[in-house]
Amino acid sequence: MTVIGLAVLAFAYIAGAASLWPLGVIAVAGGLALIGIAAVNRGLSREHLRAHVSPSLFVYIAGLFILVRGIEDAGITGALMAQLVSHAAEAGTAVAVGLFGSALLSNAVNNLPGVLVFVSGAEAGGVAP
């Protein structure tokens, strides 16, 4: 049953991205659906959640969002994107620079802030995400 729920969620992500729906709504709905499936199959208990869900992880992720917002407000993401875009003379080069830049940034920091910084910089540089 969980595999079916994950397959439906994967399809919803693809359909949502293609239709430009907010993926956060799809993620929350999918998470709630998976929790419902686990509850129905009796795979959800407080002890299981306490053992496998770390509250400090949520604090860490919230801190990453705050950090990224701070560097956005400082103008660092726009400057970073301007530097990357200056190396892209044509479409193929722009794609290569974008892929290399996001991979490098995601490996230098965490994937979440790396992608957030890259998307923020792209928006600051006038590139539609």
Image: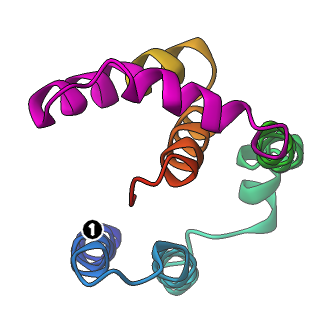
Q: Which residue is drawn at 46% across and 54% down?
A: 126
Q: In this view, does 52 lie to the left or right of 101?
A: right
| Residue located farthest toward the left when viewing the structure as drawn | 92
- Where residue 1 appears, as percent x and y from the top left, is 30, 76
The residue closer to the viewer here, 63 or 79, is 79
Q: Seen in the image, is 98 located left or right of residue 77?
A: left
- Residue closer to the observer: 89 or 68: 89
* Count of numbered circles in the view: 1
Asked if 13 appears above or below 74 in the picture, the reply is below
Work out whether 21 lies above or below 104: below
In this view, the residue in front, 91 or 23, is 91
Tell me where the magenta segment starts and ends, as one range: 72-101
123 above or below 38?
A: above
Q: Position of residue 112 (x, y in %)?
A: 59, 40
Residue pointed to by mark 1 = 10
* Magenta-drawn stretch contains 77: yes
Determine the image quadrant of residue 43.
bottom right
Q: What crowding class fits label 1: few (fewer than 14 Cα within 10 Å), some (14-19), or many (20 or more)? A: some
Q: Is residue 71 magenta?
A: no
Which coloring applies here?
rainbow
Q: Where is residue 80 in the image (x, y as percent from the top left)?
A: 58, 26
Q: In this view, does 57 lie to the left or right of 37?
A: right
Q: Main secondary structure of the magenta part?
A: helix
Residue at 80% across, 36% down? 71
Q: Which residue is drawn at 72% across and 68% down?
A: 45
In the image: residue 23, left or right of residue 91: right
| Residue 62 in the image: above or below residue 67 | below
> In the rendered image, which quarter is residue 17 located in?
bottom left
Q: Position of residue 83 (x, y in %)?
A: 50, 21
Amino acid carrying mark 1 in the image: Ala
Residue at 89% x, 41% y: name it: 56
- Which element type, helix, strand or loop, lies under badge 1? helix
